[in-house]
């Protein structure tokens, strides 16, 4: 995975499983500190991640 901002391959990848069993990936670029999320191959933003967490909280 290359960073979409600076094209450097030095990107941290962390997998998360949300409360509704959605698998998402968090990416963080060590070079320019860009951060982004991905769900099943689609880029999503942090507000979408937080909405899923909030909607599934009982
Ligand atoms: Zn970058």
Image (cartoon, grey):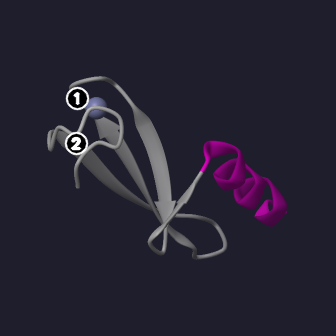
Of label 2 and label 1, which has the lower sequence position? 2
Task: Verify whether residue 34 appears in magenta.
Answer: no
**Do the residues under discs 2 and 1 have CB atoms within 8 angstroms?**
yes
At a point 29% along the width and 23% down the height, the residue shown is 32
The quadrant in which residue 18 appears is bottom right
In the rendered view of the protein, which quadrant contains the C terminus?
Answer: bottom right
Please, is residue 1 above or below residue 29 in the view?
A: below
Give the magenta range: 45-58
Which residue is painted at 48% across and 60% down in the image?
A: 38
Whether the residue under disc 2 has CB within 8 Å of ligand 1: yes
Which secondary structure, mark 1?
loop
Q: Position of residue 50 (x, y in %)?
A: 70, 48
What residue does disc 1 label? 30
How crowded pointer 2 is (Cα within 10 Å; few <14, some 14-19, many 20+) is rated as many
Residue that mark 2 sits on:
11
Q: Given the current orientation, which residue lies at the most extreme top position? A: 32
CB at mark 1 closer than 8 A to ligand 1?
yes
């Amino acid at each position: 995975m290359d960073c979409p901002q600076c094209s450097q391959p030095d990107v941290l990848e962390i997998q998360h499983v949300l409360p509704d069993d959605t698998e998402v990936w968090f990416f963080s670029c060590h070079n320019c500190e860009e951060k982004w999320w991905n769900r099943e191959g689609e880029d999503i933003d942090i507000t979408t991640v937080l909405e899923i967490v909030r909607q599934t909280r009982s």
